[in-house]
Amino acid sequence: MEKEYDFSKAEQGKFYHPLEELEIPVNLNKKVRFFFSKKAVEKNVELEEMINAVLLKEMELLSIVD
């Protein structure tokens, strides 16, 4: 490492992205992915849309219990 670094031409926030804009990858096991992929095809929707709908419903159910 150098003793000193020159930050005179640095741009603050150049690589900053708000948390809302970050895409978080979700890994599904084979059985879950196969099940929801099949259901998404049957209902003619995208896999992501199908899984989001299920998770939103689960969130509703959990808020009733809490």
Image (spheres, rainbow, N blue to C red):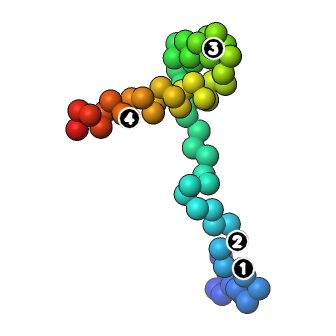
Give yes or no for contact between labels 2 and 1 (Cβ–Cβ under 8 Å): yes
- Say few, some or many: other residues with alpha carbon within 10 Å of mark 1 (under 14 / 14 to 19 / 20 or more): few
* Residue visible at 57% across and 43% down in the picture: 24
Q: Residue extending furthest bottom?
A: 8
Q: Tell me the SS state at disc 1.
A: loop
Label ID, residue 43: 3
Spatial CA span between label 1 and label 3? 48 Å
Circles 1 and 4 in contact, beta carbons < 8 Å: no
* Kind of residue at badge 3: Lys
Query: Where does label 1 land, which residue?
Result: 11
Mark 3 Cα shell of 10 Å, populated few (<14), some (14-19), many (≥20): few
Residue 35 lies in what quarter of the image? top right
The kind of residue tagged 1 is Glu
Tell me the number on the disc at residue 27: none
Q: How many marks?
A: 4
**Which quarter of the figure has residue 9?**
bottom right
Q: Secondary structure at mark 3?
A: loop
**Above or below, 5 relative to 49:** below
Which callout, 1 or 4, points at the residue further toward the start of the chain?
1
Task: Give the mark nearest the N terminus, 1 or 3.
Answer: 1
The residue beneath circle 4 is 59
Secondary structure, mark 2, is: loop
Q: Distance between the Cα atoms at labels 4 and 2? A: 35 Å
Between 42 and 16, which is closer to the camera in this rendering? 42
Cα distance in 3D space between marks 1 and 4:
40 Å
Foreground mark, 4 or 2, reads 4
- Label 3, label 2: how far apart the Cα atoms are: 42 Å
Give neighbour class at mark 2: few <14, some 14-19, many 20+ (Cα, 10 Å): few
Residue at 66% across / 21% down in the picture? 45
**What amino acid type should be assigned to the residue bearing mark 4?**
Met
